[in-house]
Image: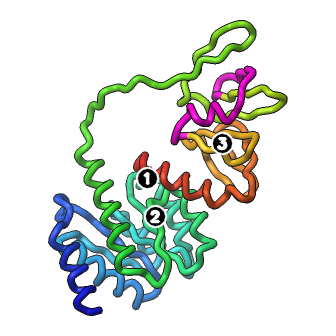
Amino acid sequence: MERVAAAFWQQKIRSPSRNEENMRIAICDDEKEIREMLAKKVQRLYPKAGLSLYASGEELLLSRGQEDIILLDIQMSGRTGMETARELRRSCKETILIFITGLEEYVFQAFDVGAFHYLMKPVDDKKLAEVLQGAAAQLEERQNRKPVEIKKEVPSLVVTAGGKHIAVKFSDIVYAEVFNRKVMLHTMDTDIEYYGKLGELEKQAGEEFYRPHRAYLINFDFVRKYDATMIYLERGTALMAKQNYQDFVKSYLRYNQRKGN
């Protein structure tokens, strides 16, 4: 077993990120043993990366560092990891947050602050390596992104309302709801009603949208907060079916990962 573990770590160390020397990783956990254990594992994976350790959320915030990746414990005495993350997001929107928790119930709260991923305690070596590798890849992609990107044609939907053909950009739709064989599209500026099926709209809308309830289709880009019964959007609200909550949270996480939030 030890030989297998050693081979696994050596394989990961042999193929570090090209930007490893410039990568800054922080670990914030109020338990010294866990903090130091994670530090050893991270150093094995990325020996050239800058590494900082913090014993509390207060310490992390006071450091005013510009870490690229933060491994943040959710359950800490004093300022919790969630409170710390919300404060961090005010000034460090690009920082990649990876939450660490011992209770799965906290996982769903983590995505409210655009978490990249989460790790359950005790932290599995292979899972830690996979998550950090994904975070490093996203970081490298951001750094290599061209300052000027080619504009893509924005997909749109053409509906017939009031005898007129109206083109609506999918990116402008905050959410849609259905009642009496009619679909109501809500944008930030207006509402458009037409005869149609929400299922057909869902197929056309793509990955940016999610159907949390049979009567609603929401645009992830306009989600501001949510709970197990309701999604609060920039304009309006949508119902959440209880059985869809966990899948919604996972889908929202994947959306944030794609967007680099």
On the image, the x and y values in percent for residue 50 come to: 23, 70
Instruction: Give me the disc on residue 143.
Output: none
User: In this picture, is 261 found above or below 125?
Assistant: above
Q: Which residue is mark 2?
A: 117
Circle nearer the viewer, 3 or 1: 1
Which residue does the image show at 35% across and 80% down from the upper left?
Answer: 125
Q: Is residue 6 magenta?
A: no
Inter-mark Cα distance, 2 to 1: 9 Å
Which residue does the image show at 38% across and 57% down from the upper left?
Answer: 95
Front-most of 49 and 123?
Answer: 123
Specify the quadrant of the image occupied by residue 246.
bottom right
Q: How many marks?
A: 3
Instruction: Give me the disc on residue 257.
Output: 1
Judged from the image, the secondary structure of the residue bearing numbered disc 2 is strand
In this view, the residue farthest toward the top is 163
Which residue does the image show at 50% across and 63% down from the upper left?
Answer: 85
Magenta span:
187-208
- Say whether marks 3 and 1 touch (CB < 8 Å): no
- Say whether marks 2 and 3 touch (CB < 8 Å): no
Q: Is residue 198 magenta?
A: yes
- Say whether marks 2 and 1 touch (CB < 8 Å): yes
Give the residue type at disc 2: His
Whichever of callouts 2 and 1 sits on the residue coming sooner in the sequence is 2
Q: Which residue is mark 3?
A: 233
On the image, the x and y values in percent for residue 8 come to: 25, 79
| Left or right: 15 as drawn, with respect to 126 | left
Give the residue type at disc 1: Gln
